[in-house]
Image (spheres, coloured by chain):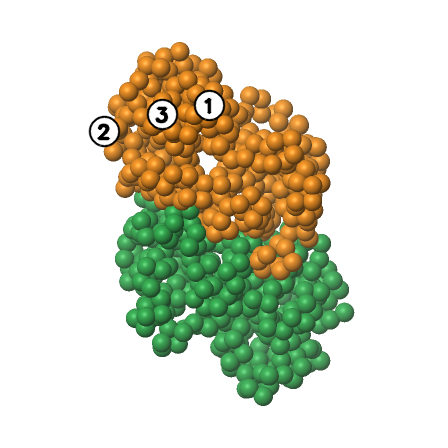
Chain colours: A green, B orange
Amino acid sequence: MAIIAVLGAGIMASALATPLADNGHQVRLVGTHLDRDIIDAIQTTGVHPNLGLQLPSGTTAYQLEDAAEAFDGVDLVMSGVNSFGVRWAGRQLASLLRPGMHVIALAKGMEADAEGNLTILPRVLADEIPADLRGRLTFSAIAGPSIAGEVAIRRHTSVVFTGDDEAAVAMWRDLFATDHYHVWTSTDFVGVEVCAATKNCYAFGAGFMSGILDSMGEEAGSRYVNFNYGAAIFGQASIEMVDFMHLLGGRPSTPLGLAGIGDCFVTSMGGRNVKCGRLVGAGLTFSEARAQMPGVTLEGAAAIVVIGSALVLLTQRGLVAPERFPLLRHLHDVVAFDRPVDVPWDSFFGADGAGGA
Amino acid sequence: MAIIAVLGAGIMASALATPLADNGHQVRLVGTHLDRDIIDAIQTTGVHPNLGLQLPSGTTAYQLEDAAEAFDGVDLVMSGVNSFGVRWAGRQLASLLRPGMHVIALAKGMEADAEGNLTILPRVLADEIPADLRGRLTFSAIAGPSIAGEVAIRRHTSVVFTGDDEAAVAMWRDLFATDHYHVWTSTDFVGVEVCAATKNCYAFGAGFMSGILDSMGEEAGSRYVNFNYGAAIFGQASIEMVDFMHLLGGRPSTPLGLAGIGDCFVTSMGGRNVKCGRLVGAGLTFSEARAQMPGVTLEGAAAIVVIGSALVLLTQRGLVAPERFPLLRHLHDVVAFDRPVDVPWDSFFGADGAGGA
């Protein structure tokens, strides 16, 4: 039996208590300062209010000030915070971690420096930890298509665990894998994480197909679902994810399967990010759509701004040809500059229309 | 202004009259023996009864016995029959075509010989035409994600035209391409057509995710959509489509973009084939599900039998390792042998779980 301390009590981190508990392990959820009510609820009722489910027995919850207690005697740590909290989480972990511990992270996104150089979030997390300690830890990450609620109730889910340290990744797989939670491993840390970040961007664009129908009202006709439009967006996303491998150093085969195509599928099927894309597709500016969703975290839109801005800088530096990533650039125009949706179809699919580069 | 004679008056062939008419071209639809009522209706009302839409002006309809009249003075021919009618269409065209004519085909599927060697359908069509005439024709094909009704009402649609003769493919593109019907071209004839055939197989499997929820009834819970399950199926489909390129001689990059991923997306979103997969996912045998859909054409299930049987033979011949194509083999077990759905998750995603080969 292992004990896993988790920083952040969001729905994904909490849902992962199910496969861990099914394997006989215990989870200690430590809430961030934003999770105070969630921790209260779990401590009182055992139910995660946002997940809407009873957490497995053996799962305990701690307020942030009790983090040291939760981390006591533990070697295994999960960072469950979202992309906005990664540097904060790194600073917290700097004082909670000890040499020899293993960290696995959930946040999806990238960070860019002032020159447009992009970094995957597990490295950003590690960057906040002093170098001498950092060198004596391992960092891994969980990616691939998984809706938290489905994981929590044992629906078949297939994911990818990745990291630099192959033995650590295999160790995490053995802790998590069950008959319902299927885990593959990859040593393409950059490739898997870049897929995870960019799929959130493209899923925003997947909302356009429904938004355009919304804007047409009755004229849209219930028989016409605009899937041809969505399929072209999805197809172009698959091509750009492979091109991101070339740009950022992932393996070109990584977007196939779970990490890219599979995750882009599940993310495009719904959620807050797609909903915002739908509002924009219906004719609102991004700012107007954003204002209709107060308080809602939009990691996809944020990733579009980070990655799209970086592409502008990388293009200025001559590192990326301006005709590469036309869909991501359009999403950036829409989200960062409130431009209307006007998909640049004729710039898609590279030189060879079959989709090959 | 060009005139295009079309053999087969199904919904896809008829929907393509819209972009052609938008470019000022005329279409002459020739019904097969199965299309008699459709042709009658178009001749009387101008409405295609299955498409449920008025066809563009300039579109005329002919019964099969008037085919020679429809083909008179025409250089451009579309074969609009489905996969079951391809050899029949080839025999009809053998007496209607003249040297110098250009043929473009819509049917999606493959044919296998007794040893399991697979052939794309445009080559099967051409095979029925005497060699001396055949050598003086060009054969092209239309692939990529397009729901017919959406093409007919000018929803944005992005497709791939392919063939051996690059000039002929470009000529067809120029005839069809409009501001809404976006056409790319590829010379990877085999790759594009193999994607088009196999995506119909995998879309059958996409029905399982909903079927499993159906079988659970109330217990499924309306919040849980089983998209994790669907995403894994979709991800594995993308990997197997690339593997089919290796097996059959297409370019490994062809499944990216429109021909594979994009088309698999749109085909998985609905239709008869997915509906049948859903019934099987809910617990019926394929034979029972088939019996609930009398008279319905199921090209995906037929393609599963053809391609799955061929894989068995190719494996026996030592040309395909038994661990390749685990999803297609399972679909074959389900459709050809009435086995229950029991997705072999742990055989998916190759050796490297990120999805790379």
Disc 3: CA contacts within 10 A as few (<14), some (14-19) or many (>=20): few
- Please say whether residue B180 is visible from this viewpoint: yes
Disc 2: CA contacts within 10 A as few (<14), some (14-19) or many (>=20): few
Q: In the rendered structure, which amino acid carries the disc numbered 2?
A: Met
Q: In the rendered structure, which amino acid carries the disc numbered 1?
A: Pro
Measured as percent of width and height from the top left, residue B350 is found at: 63, 55
Query: Residue, x 49% and y 32% (percent of image)?
Result: B123
Question: Given the image, what chain letter belongs to the residue carrying mark 1?
Answer: B
For the residues labelled 3 and 2, the Cα–Cα distance comes to 21 Å
Question: Given the image, what chain letter belongs to the residue carrying mark 3?
Answer: B
Q: Are marks 3 and 2 in contact (CB under 8 Å)?
A: no
The mark found on residue B99 in the picture is 3
The mark found on residue B1 in the picture is 2
- Count numbered badges in the picture: 3
Q: In the rendered structure, which amino acid carries the disc numbered 3?
A: Pro
Q: Left or right of B141: which side holds B332? A: right
Name the residue nearer the viewer: A124 or B146: B146
Measured as percent of width and height from the top left, residue B349 is found at: 62, 54
Element type where label 1 sits in the image: loop
Q: Looking at the picture, do discs 2 and 1 lie on one chain?
A: yes
B270 is higher (above) or lower (below) than A1 = above
Name the residue nearer the viewer: A138 or A9: A138
Query: In this figure, which residue is indicated by the disc labeled 1?
Result: B130
Mark 3 vs mark 2: which is more N-terminal?
2
Element type where label 3 sits in the image: loop
Query: Residue, x 30% and y 56% (percent of image)?
Result: A285
Measured as percent of width and height from the top left, residue A280 is found at: 34, 53
Element type where label 2 sits in the image: loop
Disc 1: CA contacts within 10 A as few (<14), some (14-19) or many (>=20): few
> Which of the two marks, 3 or 2, is nearer to us in this view?
3
Query: Residue, x 42% and y 46% (percent of image)?
Result: A354
Mark 3 vs mark 1: which is more N-terminal?
3
